[in-house]
Image (cartoon, grey):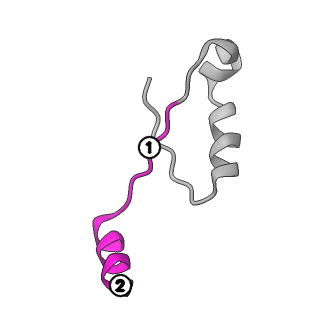
Amino acid sequence: VHAFINTMDPDQLDSLSLQLPIMKENGAHVKISCKALQIMEDYTSRILSESI
């Protein structure tokens, strides 16, 4: 099962993931793997604004 959750706060991500039906039924047997995704325009503007 793949779930895309849009949040800026890691605590909110934990809360939302624990409310998923699969977690409520099989919480002890579910492995969660998270990857951060960024909007390309936000990423490039952040990189360009950083000074080396």
Which residue bears the numbered disc 2?
52
Amino acid type of disc 1? Lys
Q: Dot 2, how many residues are within 10 Å of its Cα: few (below 14), some (14-19), or many (20+)?
A: few
The tag earlier along the polypeptide, 2 or 1, is 1
Local SS, label 1:
loop
User: Residue 25 location, x and y as percent?
Assistant: 68, 14
The residue at the point 62 percent across, 12 percent down is 29
**Dot in front, 2 or 1:** 2
User: Residue 8 location, x and y as percent?
Assistant: 57, 60
Question: Which range is magenta?
Answer: 33-52
**Quarter of the figure with residue 44:** bottom left
Magenta stretch: includes residue 23? no
Which residue bears the numbered disc 1?
35
The residue at the point 51 percent across, 45 percent down is 5
Q: In the drawing, does residue 44 fall left or right of residue 38?
A: left
> Up-down: is 32 above or below 45?
above
User: Residue 32 location, x and y as percent?
Assistant: 55, 28
Amino acid type of disc 2? Ile
Local SS, label 2:
loop
Seen from the viewer's position, the closer of residues 37 and 23 is 37
The residue at the point 70 percent across, 20 percent down is 24
**Quarter of the figure with residue 15:** top right
Magenta stretch: includes residue 36? yes
